[in-house]
Image: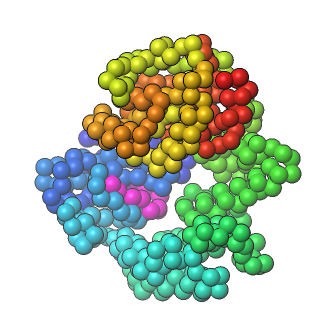
Amino acid sequence: MKKLIFSLSFLSILSCNNKTDDNFALISGKILNTDSKEITILSADRKINLKLAINNLGQFSDTLRIEPQILSFYDGKNYDTFYLEPGSLININYDSKDFNNSLNYTGKGSEASNYLKLKNTRKQNLMGNRTDFFSLNESAFIEKNKEIKTAMLTLLDSFNNISEIFKEMDKKELHYEYLNNLNSYERSHRYYTKNPNFKVSEGFLSELNELDYTNEKDYTASPNYKSLVENHYRKKSYELMKNDSLDRDIAYLKVIGDIPNQKIKNALLFNHAIFGIKYVKDVENYYTIFKSNSTNQENNDKIGEIYNNLKRLAKGSPSPEFHGYENYDGSTTSLSDLKGKYVYIDVWATWCGPCKAEIPHLKKVESQYHNKNIHFVSISVDKLSDKNKWTKMIEERELTGIQLLADNDFNSDFVKDYMINGIPQFILLDPNGNIVDRNAPRPSNPELINLFNSCNI
């Protein structure tokens, strides 16, 4: 017997073989035409991440002790969401080569999962693509948004065997989704219609006025409510940023620090800090605010570890090294070869749209600083198997500067030492190989020239 126990704030799971009662749910299934060796079961917050083995007949099975909630599965190729509550006996079957048409949920409690499958299809048909939906004029959008909510409620009520627990949960989610669409309309309409000055009419968001943003249960259970909460506090941080002339990230942490519900506060602090702390200018102040407000020790330990690593990348610290990276000209280059001049490093990849958008700006800056006391180095994190794509883009875009291919894409030591998890990232080093700015401005940002001028390059 294999036993896995997870202690979580919202969900406790006990996994064993062939055991089920009213406190447990059984999940099983069979996948035809699959090469996958395991299927992953995930919760919305990704804290639940169970790997179930798929045998040579395509079968999998496990028993879970679980609170009612929507989960998702992923076999490496196919993905869907399903509902599980105590007492459920859910069977998931499909043909990997014809997933959409063959996916089928059966067994006790499967009605909710089949509803979710049909709900997504019906909603997509009603909404159409996002561009068309959010490009509607205000009155048409309001009408369409209400139409979608009403149609989904009607669909939900047509499933007679769905549990009342799920119905209550989904009715809330449909309402939060409706509100979330309203909340997203102004920003999305500006984007899709390319009208940056568009504003919704007064009272457009009046239905959000009475929303309680401190509902811990709904924050945990509802992705749309979570989005509403995050946007609410983001807007408040913009106000604080303008009024008190604070950095955007610092203002956001300060606003979160005033949230009365500690679990929501902890979640928002961590979700922002896990990435945000790597990009703020004032790391010390940011970390101090985070630490003074967060009471989740696990979260604190993770952010504390990142903070300690960031201190090694402070201005004036020796830069992490790279050794023997392949150069487009056929030679190899190490960072130590470049000492004696400033080094402006662009970490990029051929598949990265924002990276490619910076290329014309980078070429312009390189031309402006040609024969100056600076090397321009582009390090691609393309996979070694995609070397031909890298060389082809260098040739087609007529890329200049020193063009290098990292030795192990995102797993290269240099990339990991700089904790880079998003590209493009730009780094400026001084002639001694010390860090000037680990998050230097992009070439398209006029602040880059100001930085270069401050260094007398």
Residue at 43% across / 17% down in the picture? 334
Q: Is residue 72 magenta?
A: yes
User: Which is the main secondary structure of the residues drawn in magenta?
Assistant: strand
Q: What is the x, y in percent for residue 274?
A: 58, 39
Residue at 50% across / 51% down in the picture? 45
Q: Is residue 258 visible?
A: no
Question: Residue 69 versus residue 75: which sits nearer the camera?
Answer: 75
In the rendered image, which quarter is residue 201 located in? bottom right
Residue at 68% across / 41% down in the picture? 446
Question: Residue 279 versus residue 257: which sits nearer the camera?
Answer: 279
Q: What is the x, y in percent for residue 295?
A: 68, 38
Q: What is the x, y in percent for residue 343?
A: 56, 23
Instruction: Examine the rendered structure and indicate whether residue 80 appears above or below residue 306.
Output: below
For the magenta stretch, what is the residue range?
A: 62-74
Tell me the quarter of the image containing the N terminus: top left
Q: Is residue 394 magenta?
A: no
Q: Is residue 61 visible?
A: yes
